[in-house]
Amino acid sequence: MSVGAGSAPLQATALGPIGSALENAGLTAAQAGTAEGAIRFVIALVAIWVVGRLLVVPLVTRAMNRRELDEHAQNPLLMLTKFGIAFLAFAVAFGFAGYGSFLVSMAGIAAAGALAIGFAMQDVIANFVAGVFIYTDKPFRIGDWIEWDDGTYSGTVEDISLRVTRVRTFDNELLTVPNSALTDGVLKNPVDADKLRLKFVFGIGYDDDIDRATEIIVDEAKRHPDIMDDPAPSVRLTELGDSDVGLQSRFWISNPSRADFVRTRGEYVTAVKRRFDEEGIDIPYPVRTLEGGLALESGQSIVQPAE
C-alpha cells in the first residue's frame, strides 16, 4: 500500500495542467499523459508554423527583393525556407510534447540516411549547391547571352532552377545544363554591363593608304546610330599578314544583346566595305605561290622550275 500511495503523487506530478484537467475529467493517468503530449505537440507545431509563415517568410522575401532576385529564383528559395520552418516546428514540437527520446532516434536514422543519400547523389548535391551560388552571386539572369566551356556553348538563358539552367542556343536548340558546369569553369556574360566593346579586323593591301583606310573605318562607326560616340571608336594596326595589313576597329554598343551584336557588326562591316570599294581600297585575299616541277617517269620535265 505504501508503494501505491507513493506512486500516485508521482503520476500526478508528471502530468501538466492539461493532463491534470483530463485526468479530473475521468481519464486514467496514462490516457491523460498521452493526450496531453499530443495536444502539446499540436500546439507547438501550429504556433511555430504560424510564426514562421507570418514573420520569417516575409523577412526572407524582403531580403531577396533587396538583392533584386528574379521571381523564378525566389520560388525555390521560399520553398526551402518553408521546409526549414516545418522541420524546426516538428523538432520543437517533439521536444515540447516530451517525445525527446523519439526525436533523438529519428535524428540518428535521418543522419545515417542522409549520409547514404549523400554518397549516392553527389552530382545532384553539387548541382544544387551550384544553383544556390548562381542565385546569390548572380553571374547571369534570364534573358542574358552567356558563353561557357571556352566558347563551345553559347545562348540565351531561359530558366534557372536549383539543379539545372536551360539555355536556348542561337540555332533554337534548348540546352539543359547542370549548374555545376556553369560554376566550375570560366563563364562569359557579354551583356552583363550596360555596354559592350566589339572588335573587327579589316585587311587592306600593302599598297593602300593606311591613314585613309583608318579615317573611313572611324567615320563609318560614327555614322552608325547604334555605335556609341563615348567611348569613341578607334583603329589600331595590329597585323602584318602575308598578303594584307590588319587594321583592328574597336567600337562600343549600348544595351547589348546577341541580336544587337550580330546586326550592328554586320551593318558596320558592310558600310566599311562599300566605302573601301568606292575609294579603291583593296581587301586582298591570300595568294599562294607554288614552286617546283613535275617529272615523267622517263625523266622529262613537263613544268619548268620557277626562277
Image: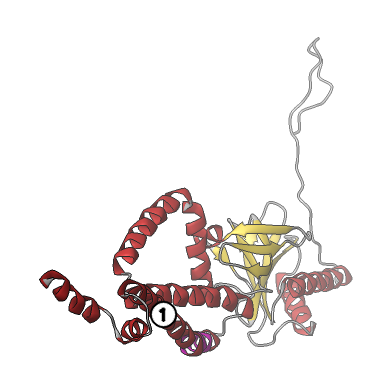
Q: Tell me which amino acid carries mark 1.
A: Ile
Residue at the front extreme, as displayed: 1
Q: Could you say which quadrant of the image residue 296 lies in?
A: top right
**Residue at the spot x=34%, y=86% of the render?**
21
Q: Position of residue 263 (x, y in %)?
A: 80, 72
Q: Quadrant of the N terminus?
A: bottom left
Question: From the viewer's perspective, is residue 244 above or below residue 189?
Answer: above
- Relative depth, front residue between 190 and 297: 190
**Residue at the spot x=83%, y=68% of the render?**
273
Number of marks in the rendered image: 1
Q: Position of residue 113 (x, y in %)?
A: 41, 54
Q: Name the magenta segment's main secondary structure.
A: helix
Question: From the viewer's perspective, is residue 174 above or below residue 57?
Answer: above
Residue 15 colored magenta?
Answer: no
Residue 57 colored magenta?
Answer: yes
Does residue 267 appear left or right of residue 18 in this picture? right
Q: Is residue 138 visible?
A: no
Question: From the viewer's perspective, is residue 147 above or below residue 190?
Answer: above
- Residue tagged 1: 39
Q: Could you say which quadrant of the image residue 42 lies in?
A: bottom left
Does residue 168 appear left or right of residue 181 in this picture? right
Magenta segment, which residues?
55-63
Q: Residues within 10 Å of mark 1 (few under 14, many from 20)?
A: some
- Relative depth, front residue between 250 and 305: 250
Q: Position of residue 153 (x, y in %)?
A: 65, 57
Residue at the right extreme, as displayed: 278
Q: Is residue 9 visible?
A: yes
**Residue at the spot x=63%, y=83% of the render?**
194
